[in-house]
Amino acid sequence: MFFREAIARALREEMQHDERVLLLGQDVGSFGGSYKELVGLHRQFGSERVRNTPVAEAAMIGVGVGAAIAGLRPVVSITYMDFLMLGLDPLVNYAAKVRYKTAGQLHAPLVVKTTAGAKRQGVAHSQCIEAWLMGVPGLKVVAAGTPADAYGLLKAALREEGPVVFVDHKRLFPTAGDVPTGEHYTPIGRAAVRRRGSDVTIATHSYMTLIAVEAATRLAAEGISCEVVDLRSLLPLDLATVCDSAARTRALLTLEEGQPACGVGAELAFRAREQLDGLRIARVGALPAPVSSNPVLEAACIPDVERVMHAVRHLLIP
């Protein structure tokens, strides 16, 4: 199943299961989503439950938060993660806080589905800002790297009683992978080991998981054994799985498409080092520059297999 089909399947099943689930966003209707990841939902459920919105992200998320508090289970689709910041006020100050403000009397079971990553669309349509959200109590943040997890994490998010940000990636939509035919849920807060190894742990998420696995495969030919941990959940983080791996390899490389400064890897590296004395750590992320729409400059900015391989070799130098 393609990654985009897994998303549509998860939404279809949850909308069939629970009539409170509805979808809001730009081009979510008959167009089927900007990346065709929502095809068929408007035809099946109609315009009452699959609603096109204006290009107004703050209003979209605000309406979604209000609908969630009122008892619905909205999914708000934000086409580019760059513009999620327009809706941070209702998401961070209301959705994430309402349970605390009301002593548990109100909840906001909202899913904000947003698309991150570079694919030749320029400086304001290519960012990965997941780390911005990792310091918000009351939020959960997930980022699938496989079609099976796109399906399972989205279904799990739609069963949560509080807000979840579901991050997908432009380059993952056309990728394919096995998805169980039966209904299943991917636990939020639990990482997955994608490849076993003994020399270095590579901890990553989303599209960078594919880069990490490819780098590990090529490094194996050099006699370097890499264990690849797909975080899947960024808030909460599954530190136990990462530390279990790093305790065996004694070396940890964090990999992300976002900025390494104050990034996912920075948080993970510090927390891992708190638990594991003497751990060798390195981080790989985007270069400190806006991501250009020029394909040569974009490729130079974003981590690739060669950069990961170089970082692993350097980390293992005695």
Image: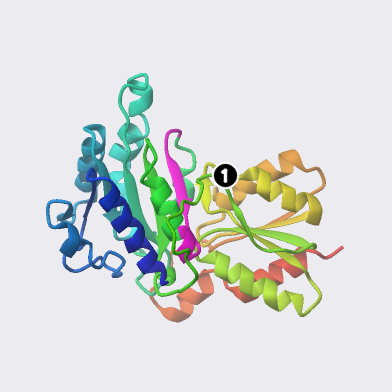
Q: Can you say whether 164 is above or below 51 in the image?
A: above
Q: Secondary structure at mark 1?
A: loop
Residue found at x 67% / y 50%? 242
Q: Nearer the viewer, residue 51 or 92?
A: 51
Crowd class of label 1 (few under 14; some 14 to 19; many from 20; radius 10 Å): many
Splitting the image into 4 quarters, where does residue 35 fall?
A: bottom left
Name the residue type under label 1.
Leu
Q: Can you say whether 315 is above or below 138 in the image?
A: below
Find residue 257 and report its horizontal and vertical position in percent.
Answer: 51, 62
Find residue 49 and report its horizontal and vertical position in percent.
Answer: 17, 51
Find residue 271 and report its horizontal and vertical position in percent.
Answer: 66, 41
Q: Can you say whether 180 is above or below 64 in the image?
A: below
Q: Nearer the viewer, residue 183 or 108?
A: 183
Q: Can you say whether 102 is above or below 244 in the image?
A: above
Residue found at x 49% / y 48%? 131
For the C terminus, give its image quadrant.
bottom right
The region drawn magenta spans 137-149
Image-based side of 45 in relation to 1, left or right = left
For the N terminus, give its image quadrant.
bottom left
Splitting the image into 4 quarters, where does residue 94 fall?
A: top left
Whether residue 128 is visible, yes or no, is no
Image-based side of 32 in relation to 295, left or right = left
Q: Nearer the viewer, residue 257 or 15?
A: 15
Find residue 304 and report its horizontal and vertical position in percent.
Answer: 57, 73
User: Is-magenta flag for residue 72?
Assistant: no
Splitting the image into 4 quarters, where does residue 122 fall?
A: bottom left
Furthest-top residue in this view: 103
Q: How is the image coloured?
A: rainbow
Furthest-front residue in this view: 182
Whether residue 313 is visible, yes or no, is yes
Residue annotated with mark 1 = 237
Residue found at x 54% / y 44%? 189
